[in-house]
Image (cartoon, helix red, strand yellow):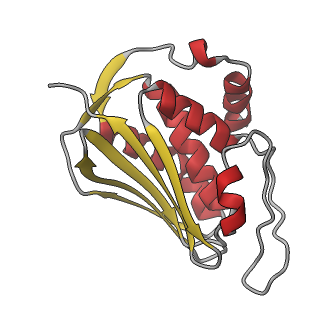
Amino acid sequence: RAWAKRMHDLTASDDQNVLREDSTFAVESLVWAVANEWRRIAEHHHIELQVDIKVRGLSIHGDAKRLSWALGALVDNAIKYTPVGGLLMIQVRPPEDGNVVIRVRDNGVGIKREELPQVFGRFFRGTPETADGRPLRVPGMGQGLTLAKQIVEAHGGEIVVKSRPGSGTAVYVHLPIAEA
């Protein structure tokens, strides 16, 4: 699967190799590319994937492919931890402090409060539970959020996770807006 190869490429890279391409591109192009890449997978899991672009015309500077991988890791997690019939939203929100804000939000099982500080740790898997308290087993190695954070920070950005068990998770990616 292409996703597994991408993850392998990223885990083999060090901080200096996170940014390989350097260009200025539209945020909405990035978001639509990620949504279109993951839409079939979401549909296969009977999850609705929506895109909501509140602000158009914003650009960012960096490696579009790597940022696509980072957002893809967030979407992948959202799909894994959202039950059948769930909703996944990729949203471009109004800028804050000179940063574009991309939010990936699901209505999945959520993350326990005590586990939130650890979610960016390499190989951290957490102990998610279904609504009826059963452990939820999903594929993966616990590297997606680690790599997403590495990529976002290499672009001068920040990534923040907010979650509540039973209500879902929202991941906010803040990236500097490129000068016109």
In the image, taking residue 20 as reference, residue 124 lies left or right, namely right
| Quadrant location of the C terminus in the rendered image | top left
In the image, taking residue 112 as reference, residue 36 lies left or right, namely left
* Point 59% across, 60% down: residue: 42
Front-most of residues 96 and 166:
96
Where is residue 37? Give x, y as percent: 52, 44
Front-most of residues 87 and 157:
157
Looking at the image, the residue that sits furthest to the left is 180
Asked if residue 101 is positioned above or below residue 42 in the image, the reply reads above
Where is residue 55? Give x, y as percent: 21, 51
| Quadrant location of the N terminus in the rendered image | top right
* Point 72% across, 26% down: residue: 11
Where is residue 173? Give x, y as percent: 44, 45
* Point 68% across, 18% down: residue: 13
Asked if residue 66 is positioned above or below residue 109 in the image, the reply reads above
In the image, taking residue 36 as reference, residue 7 lies left or right, namely right
Looking at the image, the residue that sits furthest to the bottom is 132
Q: How many marks?
A: 0
Front-most of residues 7 and 180:
180
In the image, taking residue 177 as reference, residue 9 lies left or right, namely right
* Point 55% across, 73% down: residue: 107
Where is residue 49? Give x, y as percent: 48, 62
